Amino acid sequence: MTPGRTVGELAEATGLSVRVLRHWDERGVVSPSRTPAGHRLYSADDVVRLHRAITLRALGLRLDQVAALLDGTDPDPAATLRAHLAGVDADLRRRRTVRDRLAEVLASPSDDVLSTVIREMTMVGSYVHGYHETEATRLRDQAATLADLLHDGVAFPDGAHVLEPGCGVGAQTVVLAARSPGARFTAIDLEPGQVGATRARVEAAGIADRVEVRQGDVHDPPGPVDHVVVFFLLEHLPRPDEALRALRGVLRPGGTITVVEGDHGATAFHPDSADARAVITCQEVLQRQAGGDAGIGRRLHPLLADAGFDDVAVVPRTAHAHAGRPDLADSLVRRTFTAMVAGVREPAVAAGLITPERFDAGVRDLLRTTEPGGTFSYTFFRATGTIRAYPSRASSALLDEVADEAAR
């Protein structure tokens, strides 16, 4: 009797193809012994491992993750599974956004339904700026350019634990940590590539001893923490209110939240240009189709208040580039804002929002504002809120009422 099962027998028993089983062997997921003739032979232990691998793979885990979990080489299996769950939740939210938007578009179909769907759904469920190196460079330039404008007065006491969700490439993370050298930070992002980029940036800055970087979802943030800082994240979320309530849930009493977002509607420039404004509108439309809001800055006060934060305050911070600030004209207008809107050229044209010729003309007109005689202004909004250490008078009365009811 053969002391094992062949690859063909297991393929028939499990429903996996022989090709898949061979691939799993090559990836170290399940590597059986070999007969003298070189054929794979699965022992009883191999079969048990295979069924465990099938279970983990059905959860959506990558093959390298499955192998590490089964080999016992994953240093923190619970963290791996929690991160995977966060990814599943995020995917469900993206799918819900796609489903709701598609249903909305198809509820009023046009004669050319395909063109309508392409136009209205080009960026649905996507990150409008992408994850390429050009965008990473733009984010780093933006952080360096706006550090004093956006971070002035933002500092945390020694020993405080600060959470930064949606850390991206770590552009804001290193600025925050540098301005609060005695605080401890946890930076999270849903995308593994962004986590790796932030971790590398933190290590290069020499602050890895007090800045932990890990994969995580703003809708399921780690905690408790003393403070939360959010930079340019809410504008990309289909339901920013849900994220804010989740963040409020991990703040300790007396904790604070600081949110910084832009607002494309607060853009002003000279010489004015209809083509330039059309390009900006393309970026706004695509971001809205992706589930975000490029004009969210004006909504920060009601968003934080509705999420239950106390003492909500919003301060506008305007950057104004002109002939007397050629450095700002280059960094803000050329390398930050124009680079951002220019990055949506292909999807905007593909969606039929604009012609290539008009898009290119609009970008040229935006760059014209950096030349002599040109000006450019953009307003950011910085919102703060707290979790009061002691309940308000109304909250105290409600608690007393609940206690009295319980006593009866």
Image (cartoon, helix red, strand yellow):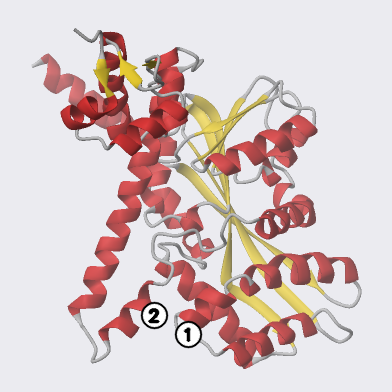
Quarter of the image for the N terminus: give it: top left
Relative depth, front residue between 88 and 170: 88
Distance, label 1 to label 2, CA atoms, is 7 Å
Secondary element under disc 2, as helix, strand or loop, is: helix
Q: Is residue 97 left or right of residue 80?
A: left
| Residue 406 in the image, given as x and y percentages of width and height | 13, 18
How crowded pointer 1 is (Cα within 10 Å; few <14, some 14-19, many 20+) is rated as: many
Quick one: which residue is furthest to the left in this view?
A: 408
Q: Is residue 326 left or right of residue 259?
A: right
Seen from the viewer's position, the closer of residues 141 and 266 is 141
Callouts 1 and 2 close, C-beta under 8 Å: yes
| Residue 13, placed above or below residue 139 | above
Place residue 390 in its image quadrant: top left
Residue 394 makes an appearance in the image: no
The disc label shown at residue 119, or none: 2
Between discs 1 and 2, the one toward the N terminus: 2
The residue lying at 38 percent from left, 26 percent from top is 81
The spot of residue 306 in percent (x, y) is 37, 50
**Disc 1 designates what residue?**
353
Please give left or right for residue 256 compared with residue 47 in the image: right
| Crowd around label 2: few <14 · some 14–19 · many ≥20 (10 Å) | some
Residue 50 image position (x, y, % from top left):
29, 21
In terms of depth relative to the viewer, which is nearer, 277 or 10?
A: 10
- Please, what is the three-letter code of the amino acid marked with disc 2? Arg
Question: Where 268 sits versus 20, above or below?
Answer: below
Residue 281 tag number? none
